[in-house]
Each structure stands twice: as structure tokens, then as C-alpha cells.
């Protein structure tokens, strides 16, 4: 079974950094692109960042570019999201997801909560 387990969230102050991790199992991780999606309280899911299967091509929401960086370690079956200069608007549940093709997610993991206080 495909399993995606996100971790690394927490309660931080505005301006701080967090690094989220997502460990995958149950499928050939190196064959798939991965992405991060977040859901703010009371809002719908928002795509944050994605990476190619090899991790050599990355894409980030333009509004977050410069603060958020995705990376992929195929040897560790893990995808990361480095988040710097966090803002209260970054508060939400962050999910990692597998790219099932054409940038569409086909599996989501359990999310990790990020709360940024002002």
C-alpha cells in the first residue's frame, strides 16, 4: 500500500523556519514526482510546490517562491519542504502527495500541522 507520512510541523513565531519531511513507502519512490499541498483553516487545498521524480526540477507557487524550497532524496524515500520567513498566513495542514501524472496528485498522506503566530 502507498503510504506517505509527513512530519516536522509545529507552532512557531512569525519569521521562523521549519523543515517538513515526508517519508514514502509502498511504491518505487524514485519513479514519481512529489508535491506539497496545504490547507489553511476554512479554505480549500492549495498546491505549494512540486518536484520531478529525480528531484532535479522543482516548481513552487510564485507567491511562495524565495521562502519555500522543495527537495527530494530518493535514497531516503523522503521529500522535504524547507519553509523560511514563515508568516501567519502560512498556517495550515501540510500534506505531501504523489504526482500521479500531469501534475495531478493520486495519493495524499496524513498532514502535519503548521501554526505561525504573529
Image (spheres, rainbow, N blue to C red):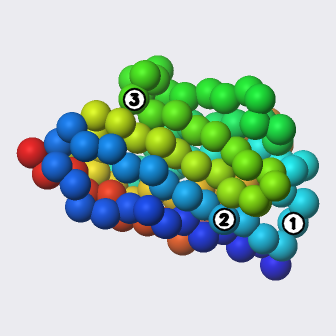
Q: Nearer the viewer, mark 1 or mark 3?
A: 3
Q: Earlier in the sequence, mark 1 or mark 3?
A: 1
Residue 63, by quadrant, is top left
Q: Nearer the viewer, residue 40 or 70?
A: 70
Say what secondary structure mark 3 lies in: loop
Residue drawn at x 72%, y 65% is 24
The residue pinned by badge 3 equals: 67
Task: Residue under label 1, please give it.
Answer: 27
Looking at marks 2 and 3 on the same chain, the residue that comes earlier in the sequence is marked by 2
Q: Residues within 10 Å of mark 3 (few under 14, many from 20)?
A: few
Question: How many marks are shown on the rendered structure?
Answer: 3
Vertical position of residue 59 compared to residue 50: above or below: above
Report the residue marked by disc 2: 23
Q: Is residue 76 visible?
A: yes
Identify the residue at horizontal 16%, vertical 49% (top origin).
Answer: 13
The residues tagged by marks 1 and 3 sit, at their Cα atoms, a distance apart of: 30 Å
Q: Secondary structure at mark 2?
A: strand
Which residue shows up at 54% across the image and 29% down it? 60
Closer to the observer: label 2 or label 1? 2
Residue sitting nearer the eye, 37 or 52? 52
Amino acid at each position: 500500500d502507498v503510504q506517505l507520512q509527513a512530519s516536522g510541523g509545529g507552532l512557531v513565531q512569525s519569521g521562523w523556519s521549519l523543515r517538513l519531511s515526508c517519508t514514502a513507502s509502498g511504491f518505487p519512490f524514485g519513479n514519481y514526482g512529489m508535491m506539497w499541498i496545504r490547507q489553511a483553516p476554512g479554505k480549500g487545498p492549495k498546491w505549494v510546490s512540486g518536484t520531478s521524480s529525480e528531484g532535479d526540477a522543482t516548481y513552487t507557487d510564485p507567491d511562495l517562491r524565495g521562502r519555500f524550497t522543495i527537495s527530494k532524496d530518493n535514497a531516503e524515500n523522503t521529500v522535504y519542504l524547507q519553509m523560511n520567513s514563515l508568516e501567519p498566513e502560512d498556517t495550515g495542514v501540510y500534506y505531501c502527495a504523489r504526482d500521479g501524472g500531469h501534475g495531478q496528485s493520486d495519493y495524499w498522506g496524513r498532514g502535519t500541522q503548521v501554526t505561525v503566530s504573529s
